Image (cartoon, rainbow, N blue to C red):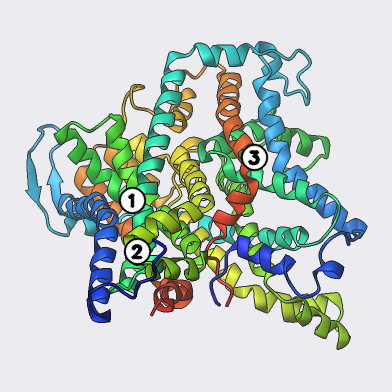
């Protein structure tokens, strides 16, 4: 071991080839598993979506081409789920970014109690989404929950409302439980971005006589943009797949249908394998389209990881 | 320069030229408005937990009064949750699924991440993009066909039938997090091993892996939390308590009957499965933060 030799045997070209072969061998198990368990089922789902299956007789099916897709795209159910999912994603991600930025700014201040704040803020992140839904359901329990009681005491509207039973209100509860659970994620990503802004930048701004608001608007925010965009990408792609929250809170009723929830209901409860598969493929395509847009415009970090080693 | 990770960030901040004056011990006195905001944020984070615990300690008529404090706190709900065989089975299932998935994902992912972080490789950008795009797959697109396939080959409603697809989603998360950790390990160490005639694989086993233990632990925590949390695959691919993990068991707790008031027991069950996660956050806070922000972009 102690003896230092030069590169053994093969020349640099041979070593390169050996390295590439090793790299291929080391990534193969993961790639094969992901291909088999992700790509194969999606291929199968496409096949299922092109057929109509008999509910009464197992195994009886009929090829219908794009019929299921045309039905779905002509149905108000799909477009309602589509619209409500995007509404949920837009509102919850905007709130998470605004609140997350504010939390990150707080966590970046040196003050007594910062460590405590960081711990407290992180707690909802670890909670199971289903439990987050249950927690907010108990908070909004008609008459008995904390929030109806507070609203009642303050004589505010909403005290007598069955929150999960009404359009708009139900969506508000779902958004609130999502914001509660996932804002810490956004806050921490943004905080990491905040911590790499150099002190000198701030000192320069101070010398130029910038006030706090000007510093925030013209220095902090622009420099934070990449971190906020990254957090927003992750959160949006997650929000568009929302399932657990409507499943537990409303089963998709009262204006809270999601694309995943609709496909699930068609497949499992209504046993509509063909149309249900078409809906799940449409969900897939919608999310992929959004993520393609994001990777195109915000995926700089992926290209960086790939580039750096060459 | 453009990719930073949280541990590195804190390190560079503390190790900068003028650390003595800047960083430590200079605590700001906050403006009262800012304090108010701190209190509001803490309240928003904690009050729902309090309300869940409050509900879980009430029984019978006390549940119907919505008191702010339980006047006659009782552990009956907890006792009945632990007497519930299905819930215990679900706990067992969740532990098996999460532990096995995490371990297997860690082994597979550490190989892949090393190759992606360090080795020369063809089409690396494409492979990384593909891996990352799997994390954005809506689970429903996989759950639906797996529901049919698993029923044909007998994996439906079994633990392996859940572990395999969960692994597909755990792997990209693990690979992505580990790749950024591996890249933070200084190259000099491997290079001196190469000088000693070690192969890249030996360098991986003897140098990178031991140095990456903190990164592996962080990745394990993140994967564990995400697998423990996962719901859609779990609810689609199981039908009986024998294979149901905890989130599904709890989601179906409320289905018992319209007249029965399961609010207390559901809350107790929710508190029970939240406790281990809260402990995890309290003990491993730094790791979780560094893992979540691994690979966050600077510029």
Both labels 2 and 1 in a single chain: yes
Left or right, A194 with reference to B271: right
Image coordinates of residue B53 in percent, x first then y, are: 68, 26
Residue B138 visible in the current orientation:
no
Extreme residue toward the bottom, this view: A208
Q: Label 2 is found on which chain of the structure?
A: B
Q: Residue at x 72, y 76 (%)?
A: A198
Mark 2 closeness class: few <14, some 14–19, many ≥20 residues within 10 Å: some
* Sequence-first disc among 1 and 3: 1
Q: Nearer the viewer, residue A14 or B57?
A: A14
Q: Which of marks 2 and 1 is in front?
A: 2
Task: Look at mark 3 in the image and give the residue it sits on.
Answer: B283
Q: Which residue is drawn at 84% across and 67% down?
A: B20
Q: Label 3 is found on which chain of the structure?
A: B
Task: Look at mark 2 in the image and give the residue it sits on.
Answer: B198
Q: What element carries label 1?
A: helix
Image coordinates of residue A188 in percent, x first then y, are: 64, 58
* Sequence-first disc among 2 and 1: 1
Q: Is mark 3 on a helix, strand or loop?
A: helix
Left or right, A277 with reference to B63: left
Q: In the picture shown, does residue B152 fall above or below A211?
A: above
């Amino acid at each position: 071991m102690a003896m230092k030799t030069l590169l053994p045997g093969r020349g640099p070209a041979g070593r390169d080839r050996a390295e590439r072969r090793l790299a291929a061998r080391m990534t193969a198990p993961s790639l094969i598993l992901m291909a088999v368990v992700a790509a194969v089922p999606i291929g199968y789902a496409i096949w299922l979506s092109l057929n109509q299956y008999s509910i009464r007789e197992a195994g009886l099916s009929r090829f219908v081409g794009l019929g299921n897709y045309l039905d779905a795209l002509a149905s108000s159910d799909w477009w309602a789920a589509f619209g409500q999912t995007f509404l949920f994603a837009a509102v919850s991600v905007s709130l998470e970014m605004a609140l997350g930025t504010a939390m990150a700014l707080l966590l970046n201040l040196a003050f007594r109690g910062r460590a405590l704040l960081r711990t407290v803020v992180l707690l909802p992140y670890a909670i199971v989404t289903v439990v987050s839904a249950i927690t907010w359901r108990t908070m909004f329990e008609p008459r008995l929950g904390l929030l109806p009681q507070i609203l009642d005491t303050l004589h505010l509207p909403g005290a007598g409302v069955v929150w999960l039973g009404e359009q708009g209100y139900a969506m508000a509860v779902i958004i609130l439980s999502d914001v509660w659970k996932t804002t810490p994620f956004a806050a921490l990503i943004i905080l990491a971005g905040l911590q790499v802004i150099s002190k000198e930048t701030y000192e320069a701004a101070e010398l130029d006589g910038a006030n706090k608001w000007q510093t925030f608007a013209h220095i902090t925010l622009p420099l934070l943009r990449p971190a906020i965009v990254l957090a927003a990408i992750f959160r949006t792609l997650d929000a568009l797949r929302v399932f657990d929250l409507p499943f537990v809170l409303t089963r998709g009723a009262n204006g809270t249908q999601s694309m995943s929830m609709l496909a699930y209901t068609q497949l499992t409860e209504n046993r509509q394998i063909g149309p249900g598969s078409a809906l799940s493929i449409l969900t897939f395509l919608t999310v992929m389209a959004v993520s393609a847009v994001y990777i195109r415009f915000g995926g700089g970090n992926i290209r960086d990881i790939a580039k750096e080693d060459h | 320069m453009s990719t930073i990770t949280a541990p590195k960030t804190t390190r560079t901040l503390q190790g900068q030229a003028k650390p003595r004056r800047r960083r430590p011990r200079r605590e700001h006195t906050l403006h009262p408005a800012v304090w108010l905001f701190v209190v509001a944020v803490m309240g928003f984070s904690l009050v729902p937990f309090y309300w869940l615990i409050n509900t879980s300690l009430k029984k019978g008529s006390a549940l119907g009064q919505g008191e702010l404090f339980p006047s006659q706190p009782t552990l009956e709900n907890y006792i009945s949750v632990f007497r519930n065989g299905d819930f215990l089975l679900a706990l067992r299932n969740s532990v098996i699924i999460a532990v096995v998935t995490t371990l297997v994902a860690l082994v597979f992912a550490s190989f892949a991440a090393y190759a992606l972080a360090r080795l020369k490789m063809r089409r690396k950008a494409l492979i990384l993009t593909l891996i990352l795009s799997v994390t954005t797959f809506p689970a429903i697109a996989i759950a639906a066909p797996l529901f049919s396939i698993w029923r044909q080959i007998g994996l439906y409603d079994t633990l392996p039938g859940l572990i395999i697809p969960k692994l597909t989603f755990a792997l990209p998360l693990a690979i992505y997090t580990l790749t950024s950790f591996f890249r933070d390990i200084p190259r000099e160490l491997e290079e001196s091993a190469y000088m000693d005639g070690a192969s890249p694989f030996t360098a991986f086993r003897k140098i990178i892996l031991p140095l990456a233990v903190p990164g592996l632990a962080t990745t394990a925590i993140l994967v564990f939390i995400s697998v423990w949390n996962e719901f859609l695959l779990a609810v689609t691919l199981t039908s009986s308590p024998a294979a149901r993990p905890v989130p599904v068991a709890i989601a179906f707790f409320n289905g018992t009957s319209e007249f029965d008031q399961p609010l207390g027991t559901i809350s107790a069950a929710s508190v029970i499965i939240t406790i281990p996660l809260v402990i995890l956050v309290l003990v491993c806070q730094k790791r979780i933060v560094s893992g979540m922000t691994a690979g966050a972009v600077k510029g």
